[in-house]
Structures are given as structure tokens and as C-alpha cells.
Image: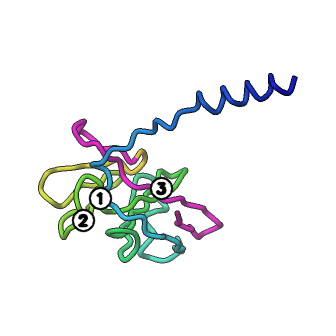
Amino acid sequence: MKSLYRLILFILLVSCSGNSVVDKNCRFLLDIGVNFTIDLSLPQYSQLAFAGNSVYIPNEGNAGVIVASTGVDFYAWDASDPNHAPNDCSALVPSGLNGTCGCGDGNTYNFVTGAPDGNDGLRCALKNYRVQQNGNSLLIFN
């Protein structure tokens, strides 16, 4: 009976594959530790009280962090375009629940899904950060 359990365990271990898809083109962004809190009652974050808005928070992540509100949930994304090496123009410019890269190529991303919006040729999605709401505060972290 022990040998049967060992055989089943062996088969399970061998059959599990590590075939995660790693796209070498999606390695532009650094894994920078993010851990900060914003107070939604402050004027600079007041537009997050309304659905369909987003705010840019500088000096966090690779090129800042964008926090978006759907009216029900909050999402936080790194503001650097993941399809570019970070440079002066690769920070996203938020507009509602979308953001566009400033490099002139028109890379646009959805702040609810993090996926490229309107350009199926882009390989990389936005880098997501976790958001935890506690009363009138949002903790953004990875």
C-alpha cells in the first residue's frame, strides 16, 4: 500500500509542469517595493469618490502609481508603460479609467483590467498593486 501511495505521489510530481509563459519582452519594470496609504478625504484624492476616475501618485513604483475607482472597487497600477523601457515619456497619463503612454505611440491601457486597450499587438499588461480599503484610507502595496 505504501508503494502505491509513493507511485501516485511520484506521478503527481512528475506530471506537474512549470510551463509558465515568460515573455522576455515584459521585463522592463523593476520589482520595486510599494507600501503607502492615501487618505480619500484629502482634496487631491477627492475624485476617487466618483466612479470612473483615476489619480496619479508620483514618487512610488517605477514611474508613479495610478489609483482608479469604479465606484465599487479600487485598482492600483504602476504608471510606467510595461511595453517600453522606462524613460522620460513612458509614464502613463490617466484619463478616467484609461491611461495613455506619453511616448507618442498611442499605447493605451484599461485601469480596471490592466490590459492594453485598443491595441492587440501589445504583449505586456500593467503591473498591478494590491489595494486594501480601511474606512477612508487606501493601503497600496505589493
Answer with mark 1 or mark 2, whichever residue precedes in sequence.
Answer: 1
Q: Which mark is residue 75?
A: 3
Q: For the residue labelled by badge 2, is the local secondary structure a helix, a strand or a loop?
A: loop
**Residue occupied by mark 2:** 86
Front residue of 110 and 78: 78
Residue drawn at x 40%, y 69% is: 61
**Residue occupied by mark 1:** 28
Q: Which residues are magenta?
A: 114-142
Front residue of 8 and 41: 8
Q: Position of residue 118 (x, y in %)?
A: 24, 39
Q: Quadrant of residue 9?
A: top right
Q: Which mark is residue 61?
A: none
Relative height, residue 15 to residue 102 (above, below) = above
Answer with mark 2 or mark 3, whichever residue precedes in sequence.
Answer: 3
Answer with mark 3 or mark 1, whichever residue precedes in sequence.
Answer: 1
Residue type at the position of mark 3: Tyr
Residue type at the position of mark 1: Phe
Q: Position of residue 110 (x, y in %)?
A: 35, 47
Q: Quick check: 92 left or right of 5?
A: left
Mark 1–mark 2 contact, CB under 8 Å? Answer: yes
Give the number of the mark in front: 2 or 3.
2
- Farthest-out residue, right: 1
Residue type at the position of mark 2: Pro
Marks 2 and 3 sit apart, C-alpha to C-alpha, by: 22 Å
Residue drawn at x 38%, y 71% is: 57
Q: Is residue 10 magenta?
A: no
Relative height, residue 1 to residue 86 (above, below) = above
